Amino acid sequence: MTNHELELKNITMQFGGVVAVDNLSMYVDSGEIVALIGPNGAGKTTAFNCVTGVYKPTNGQVLYRNSVIVSNHPQGKMAALYAGQDAGIYKETVEPTPDKITKLGLARTFQNIRLFKTQTVFENVLIATHLHRTSNLLTAALHLNYKEERKLRELALEMLRVVGLEDLKNEIATSLPYGKQRRLEIARALATKPKLLLLDEPAAGMNPQESDDLAQFIVSIKQKFNLSVFLIEHHMDLVMDISDRIYVIDFGKLIAHGTPGQIQDNPDVIAAYLGVDEQ
Amino acid sequence: MKTNKIIISILLIICAVGLIIYSSGSQDGLDELLLRMDTQNLADSDAKMQKALGRVQESILENDRNKILRNLDRYTETFSQKLDLGGQNAADLFIYKNGPSANAISILIFAIGIAILLSAFDKNGRLKLPSVYFVLVVALYAGVYIAENTIGSNSMLMTVLKKGVIYALIAVSMNLLNGFTGLFSLGQAGFMLIGAYTYAIFTIPPASRAQVYQYYDGGLIQFAMPAVPAIVLAGIAAAFFAFLIGLPVLRLKSDYLAIATLGFAEIIRAIFQYDGLGPITNGSNLLRRFTTFNTALFPFIVAGVSIMLIALVINSTYGRSFKAIRDDEVAAEAMGINLFRHKQMSFVISSFFAGVGGALLAMYQTTVQASAFKASMTYEILLIVVIGGMGSITGSVMTSFLFVAASEWWLRFLDNDLIIGGFQVPLLRSGFRMVVFSIVIMIMVLFYRRGIMGDKEFTLKKLFAPRVKKGGKEHD
């Protein structure tokens, strides 16, 4: 048995007749930064949502540290409609809610920033520490958990320090500039103490300077917290700089896999991104 | 400075204790005095007056003018004697009447003394905010107690205060659900009904049951509970129903949740009126003769403790996750918050306190009838929550009092005919109050869409904080 941190086996996601992700198999090893790239609408975020429990894949399995966390096979209407491959290999059905996946140690950020709008920067991060609680409703309400509460607050503050937003902790989250909101999302994800960080287009809408900073930042937190990182990205510079391995998908299908060097020279990838001359 | 404070506080405390002992002592003596006055002296003087009056009547019959005048003089003499009897004790009477107020004031002085004593041992020698709040709360309760004993418990002011504080509790419980967790639920009247009925059913004394359940042979239950455990039981009953209903209903979102909970409230109302349940619920008849409160302090204490508990929940880590669910369900779930369990928690807590509020409302009204808990009652509460501000406890509390005062008291004159100089003011007639009320609400919703407080809380810190100029240092 191979010891991958995260492994996707034959993940297929079909919405009605549209196959958004088609038979995607990939893995992330411990301590790696792995990128999933592809043109718009290639199915990257859908694949991400299958891993984090937002969608239930039509077929396939996701394993985290060799234990199955998501599993499904075509059922009901989908059994007749199914257009993918390998139907019926995975007989067991495991469909966790996103909070259970997060509790396992997989934290994610969102492509379109989803901060808690009415809360301050500090509260945003503090909410993410809720899953470390050991207090129940009664002890929390009567403030008998003040020691734990203090610890959680310290953790939240520590995460803000890591992303450099400590000075802004009392600002309303959505009043921050765009780049800082992205960092806040990462701080929030880190506050759940993940082992695997899933970043959904962390550099979206950033200029080259900002995306360079972000690249260094991702590498630094990866080392600091001993993380594995799985990211989706459009910015080729960022991906080529920091990724150990890259997967490329187009129309839901995996078209290439390899190190940044290999991917840059791959004719299929160039064709997918730039189009092919029709002669 | 420190010793001064300690001395002042000890003096205040001694003063308060002395005042309590004095006023309660003088009250005991006065009780006896008044008793004697009532039974003997007053009876004697009454007899004298009757005699004098008899003589006056006799002399009128005799038609002797001088005799009439003489007897009338005697009569007025006995009359003034009786008045004197009351007048002699005017000072004592004053203390008797104001004894309760004196007690309340001395407790307030006691609280102030303790607050000053605490500040003496503080590092910076400052008055701590919690002790200021403590003194304010004591002052509020003392004020209610004094008002009740001087103005009278049946006055309009006391009615508004009693109903207002009950509505405040129910509004805050609804705000927990609608304002803090973002679940648009309209089942509040249903949970209030469960609470009110549970309370009423379990506190009717067995002796009165035959009369109350006259159509159902005295009903099934033949025991009564003390008031406080019955109130807790009322809350638990409402919470239990909320737990059961929440299982299917909380999987719905926004408007659908509102429709489902509204439907539930209506169904509950119909079930409680069902004749087959008569031995327990008394069918569609009134429930009455259950234990009620005889001082306004009771609802104030129960509602005060309940609101404080809700505030504590909201300020805990669970409250933070409720707010996270309100702001963004997807992100909250991705942060490891189990949506269903937290929604259920919020729903059950909210319903528990709605049940407690229902029990208090039953006590306030002294009778309960299921047909009173209509959807319009939920809308009234929702109105308070929206006007006060979704996500503001203090907003809900303040608006409850304003709402009750306006609907029961201040706008009453609009319902009566008014004639100025022979000219009848048009439009003023029964029901016009509600027209004006709706216009006021429409203006509120149009111009203060986020309510009086928005999602902010009213705090002393903000009230007294110096206005911070831009670039200036923030004051803590």
Image (spheres, coloured by chain):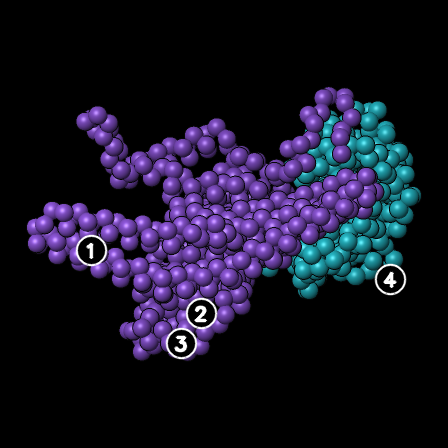
Q: Which mark is residue B53?
A: 1
Most foreground residue, B467 or B255: B467
Can residue B456 be seen here?
yes
Query: Chain B in the picture: what colour?
Result: purple
The vertical placement of A57 against B29, above or below, is above
Marks 2 and 3 close (CB-CB < 8 Å): no
Q: Secondary structure at mark 4?
A: loop
In this view, the mark in front (3 or 4):
3
Q: Residue, x 69% and y 64% (percent of image)?
A: A92
In this view, the mark in front (3 or 1):
1
The answer for how far apart the CA atoms under marks 3 and 4 are is 74 Å
- Which amino acid, by three-letter code, is at mark 1? Leu
Q: Is residue B145 left or right of residue B112?
A: left
Chain letter, disc 1 residue:
B
Q: Residue, x 27% and y 37% (percent of image)?
A: B416
Most foreground residue, A238 or B417: B417
Residue B59 in picture, x, y percent from top left: 12, 54
Q: Secondary structure at mark 2?
A: helix
- Which amino acid, by three-letter code, is at mark 2? Thr
Query: Chain A in the picture: what colour?
Result: cyan
Q: Is residue A130 left or right of residue B123?
A: left
**Callout 2 environment at 10 Å: few (<14), some (14 to 19), or many (20+)?**
many
Q: Residue, x 91% and y 44% (percent of image)?
A: A224
- Pointer 3 residue: B206
